[in-house]
Amino acid sequence: MAENIVIIGAVAAGPKTACRLRRLNPEAKITIIDMDNLISYGGCGIPYYVSGDVSDEKELRSTSFHVLRDAQFFSNAKGVKVMIRTEVTKIDRRNKTINFTNLDSGEAGSMPYDKLVICTGAAPNQPPIAGADLPGVHYVSNMHQAIAIKDKLAKGQVGRAVVIGGGAIGLEMAESFADLWEVETAIIEFMPQILPKAVDRIFAMMLTNHLRQNGIQVHVSENVQKIEEVEGGYKVTSNKRSLETDIVIMAVGVHPRTDL
């Protein structure tokens, strides 16, 4: 009997795992389940989509031959079933089954497995800052957020941007705003330097000077205390200053998705 393999998560690791397993086990029945409808993309490409280096979000979800990697592609080209807009609600390890619910229809069901692979990735940290849930605050966590940010930029709705977090994603997003779109951009970092866990102080100073020379404000050793909606946009207040902005990017790290 063919081995039944279920993979939870269809962004990057899930599809890669499915394709590798298909090569190793051509007879296996492989199913990928994901809550979203946009699948199989590299999240690290999001800043390049926002900047315009990648013109269409579909490019992040396509093969090198420009074939869109959607559920139909995996079914036809890889022999892998993909269930989109479906949430796994329970794992019964004793009986080797999962329960799931379709997020559109509400229909519930269960599925047996011989092997289960969990590829649910990480979720963005949401710091306890007042106003962090306002509509102008974006977390760079999925393609839907990326499309929303790019849409605002393309419509000319963003002239000022504040990026909270001076890690890799924060710096890439700041560059995306300031470079192509010429948006007045500021970075606020809690630690005494940008990229605090990645580079030493000297290199961080060199990067800070480079950013400032390219028109990006860099504020370190600052604690954001609140985000407010004001006339014409938003106001971000730290322990040292207030900055008015049209959009806020929250880039303060991630944590594993363990809510399943």
Image: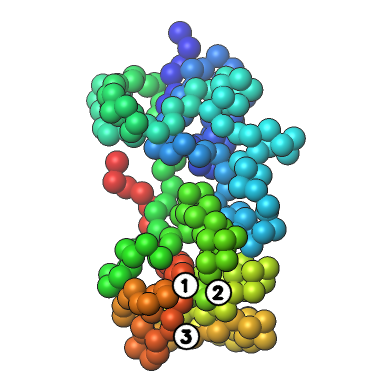
Label 1 or label 3, whichever comes before in sequence order: 3
Which residue is at 64% across, 22% downward? 77
Q: Nearer the viewer, mark 2 or mark 3?
A: 2
Please tell me how crowded label 1 is: few (under 14), some (14-19), or many (20+) other residues with Cα within 10 Å. many
**Kind of residue sitting beneath label 1:** Asp
Q: Is residue 143 left or right of residue 114?
A: right
Q: Considering the image in quadrants, where does the C terminus appear?
A: top left
- What's the CA distance linking mark 1 and mark 3? 21 Å
Secondary structure of the residue carrying numbered label 3: loop
Which x, y percent locates residue 17? 54, 34
| Most distant residue in the right direction | 65
Which residue is at 43% across, 62% downward? 138
Which x, y percent locates residue 220? 47, 85
| Most distant residue in the bottom direction | 240
**Kind of residue sitting beneath label 3:** Val
Q: How many marks do you count on the picture?
A: 3
Which residue is at 33% across, 65% downward? 134
Label 2 or label 3, whichever comes before in sequence order: 2
**Kind of residue sitting beneath label 2:** Gly
Query: Disc 1 vs disc 2: Cβ atoms closer than 8 Å?
Result: yes
Q: Which residue is mark 3?
A: 220
Q: Which residue is mark 1?
A: 246
Label 1 or label 2, whichever comes before in sequence order: 2
Secondary structure of the residue carrying numbered label 1: loop
Quadrant in the rendering for residue 231: bottom left
Given residues 81 and 21, the one toward you in this image is 81
Q: Which residue is mark 2?
A: 159
As drawn, 56 above or below 225: above
Q: Is residue 9 left or right of residue 98?
A: right
